Image (spheres, rainbow, N blue to C red):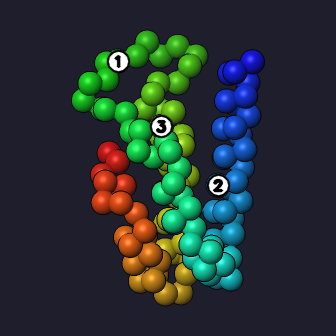
Amino acid sequence: MLFLDSLNQLYVYESQLSMLIRMTQTVSGAKQLLENKIFLRLIHCQFIDQRPDYSSLSEEDGGWFPSVVERYHQLFLPILRLVVCLLLSHPRHEDVASQVTESAPIDFFTCC
């Protein structure tokens, strides 16, 4: 049952990020997200700081369960997509870039 709960949480997370990414496709949506400090909220996601150590990972046997790296990327890549979409759709992308760098810890950008 724990596996199904985790899977449901993943689906909810993916749906929420998908909705936020869709919001960034309009200038007004991008502005709303920035005004509500979306980056300050995202950096509090606990999984971001739990990056897998790529150097110590061995080749996993490719069973039906995704590797640790694949699972981390499944969670982290939508956040990167959101950042890129905000940069592309907001008319003052310098404001977006400054909000990202001001709100994120320095090691946030050393993910890979």
Q: Amino acid at mark 2?
A: Leu
- The picture places residue 25, in percent across and down from the top left corner, at 65, 72
Calculate the distance from the C-alpha at mark 1 to the C-alpha at mark 3.
16 Å
Tell whether 71 sits left or right of 112. Answer: right
Q: Which residue is mark 1?
A: 59
Q: Which residue is mark 3?
A: 72
The residue drawn where x is 69% and y is 21% is: 2
Calculate the distance from the C-alpha at mark 2 to the C-alpha at mark 1.
30 Å
Q: Which residue is mark 2?
A: 17
Can residue 18 be seen here? The reply is yes
Tell whether 49 sits left or right of 41. Answer: left
Q: Is residue 3 above or below residue 8?
A: above
- The picture places residue 98, in percent across and down from the top left corner, at 39, 78
- The picture places residue 26, in percent across and down from the top left corner, at 67, 78
Q: Amino acid at mark 1?
A: Glu
Label 3 Cα neighbours within 10 Å, binned few <14 / some 14-19 / many ≥20: some
Where residue 54 sits, quadrant-wise, is: top left
SS label for mark 2:
helix
The mark tally for this picture is 3
For the residues bearing labels 1 and 3, Cβ distance under 8 angstroms: no
Can residue 85 be seen here? The reply is no
- Sequence order check: which comes first, mark 2 or mark 1? 2
Where residue 34 sits, quadrant-wise, is: bottom right
Residues 75 and 2: in front is 2
